[in-house]
Image: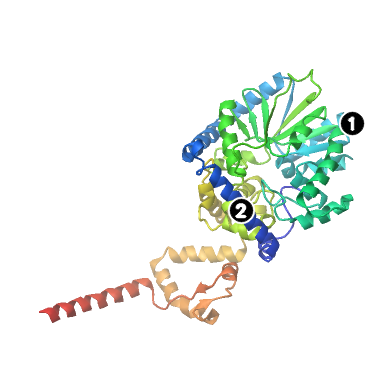
Amino acid sequence: MSMKVGNQPFFEGVDEAIHNSFMVNAVSSAQDGLRDKKLRATVGDETLGDWENWRNAGEEIRSFTLNHLDYYLKQLSDNFSARGGHVYFAQTAEEARDYIKKVVRDKKAKNIVKAKSMVTEEISLNEALEEEGCNVLETDLAEFILQVDKDRPSHIVVPSVHKNRQQVRDSFKKLGYTGSDDPKELAGFARKTLRSQFLKADVGITGCNFAVADTGSICLVTNEGNANMVTTFPETQITVMGMERLVPSWKELDILVTLLCRSSVGQRLTTYVTDITPGGQLDTVDSPKDFHLVIVDAGRSNALGTEFQPALHCIRCAACLNVCPVYRHIGGHAYGSIYPGPIGAVLSPILGGYKEYGKLPYASSLCAACTEACPVKIPLHQLLIKHRRKYVEGGGNPPVGEKIAMKGFGIGASSPFMFKVGMKTAPILLKPLVDNGAIEKGPGPMRPWTHGRDLPAPSSENFRAWFKKHKEVESENKTKETSEWQ
């Protein structure tokens, strides 16, 4: 596996998803709940002050950090190394996997526990370690459920949102569970199962919400406490982070953690905000003795210095997913990427290319709700339009029929004569497809559009002709009224 989810073409995945009534209802319910909590914790919390000022600060911090990324990455690396940690810069997913496998091999590790990491999903780390003969265990409850079911995440913050408790109960039966579908009972079973694994783990692997450059620290924002177990029991700790996930200092971290907690789950602060720094804990019994930081590029450099750089400002709060009308109807798996929703539709083509993810920018109504919801003000709907432009200009590989149609439209629309001819002939050419004043099943490139809605039949009278006639009638009526008064 990789950042790709499933093997279906995009539109086939969408067709399947919109007919999955359970998933649609579950996603809708989760969206409503998370959005309401966010509103109460942001614009509805008078103790916070002006939420827009917080958003402005978040945008400035992310923009400043990305504009000086080389400086702060070096500072992070120097400080992490100076405290006894090991830093590895991985340009590709393969390089990251190879380094981590070497560490695991050198340690002769067999039992590995993980927590809080989308980027390890992105680089297919679990599969690579299992090929090394390791037992890899996800310890976030939602990720644990997905691992038992050999399923993939469908949401950035609540990855198993597409499952109900009956399905979770059935999944746990594979592990010997005999209880009911009561959430407390299910969570208790997972807790008991996971706890014994923490105690015998050789290596702990986590992601990273933010790295603090001026101290070389790693920050994890969680609610379950499992990440603390992953970073406490094993003697070897490996943290994997995307190269953009850092802040200059603790001062900026404070602001971004506030934005993240309130935007993702509507909490003023999550239950645990864990900060780990190499060294300093070497004489303690509850901290890693060997700490590795793997900083992953894996396509992120494609956005640096381009119009898509703001996509790297993302703090993975998923606020954009929770307001997106498209995500609401198709869920996460239909996107075919571990990064779904509006940010996924922007980020996936950057990381994985237009050939694989070029259709995703079209999974948007361009209503701009995502841009309004983003706590660091990423102009998501504008980036989606820019992706579409690059896709049709040759960045992607659109179908031949679509290329010919767009080329023909471009030629016709740029010539007044051709445009007039087109306006006059379109009603005649499309007449066989018209039924009750609309086209319900269009051919070629029109098919996906008419699959979801009816295309109004082109009128035999264009707007200019109608307007001219309308003004003439209006003028005649005024003249008539004037004559009557005289």
- Mark 2 secondary-structure assignment: helix
Q: Reading the chain from its start, which is encountered first: label 1 or label 2? A: 2
Disc number for residue 259: none
- Mark 1 secondary-structure assignment: loop
Q: Identify which residue, 14 or 93, lies in the foreground.
A: 14
Horizontal side, residue 360 vs residue 478: left or right: right
Q: Residue at x 37, y 71 (%)?
A: 463
Mark whose residue sits in front, 1 or 2: 2
How far is mark 1 from mark 2, CA to CA?
44 Å
Residue 396 visible in image: no
- State the image coordinates of residue 130 (x, y, percent, origin top left): 86, 42
- State the image coordinates of residue 237 (x, y, percent, origin top left): 78, 30
Hey, what amino acid is under mark 2? Gln
Looking at the rendering, in which quadrant would you find the C terminus? bottom left
Q: Residue at x 80, y 23 (%)?
A: 289
Horizontal side, residue 95 vs residue 176: left or right: left
Residue contact at pointers 1 and 2, CB within 8 angstroms:
no
Residue wearing tag 2: 31
Hey, what amino acid is under mark 1? Lys
Q: Identify which residue, 168 or 235, lies in the foreground.
A: 168
- State the image coordinates of residue 160 (x, y, percent, origin top left): 72, 51
Q: Identify which residue, 302 or 197, lies in the foreground.
A: 197
Mark 2 crowd level (few <14, some 14–19, many ≥20, 10 Å Cα): many
Residue wearing tag 1: 108
Mark 1 crowd level (few <14, some 14–19, many ≥20, 10 Å Cα): few
Name the colouring of the figure. rainbow
Above or below: residue 45 compared with residue 291: below
- State the image coordinates of residue 339 (x, y, percent, origin top left): 66, 48
Q: Residue at x 56, y 65 (%)?
A: 404
Above or below: residue 198 compared with residue 75: below
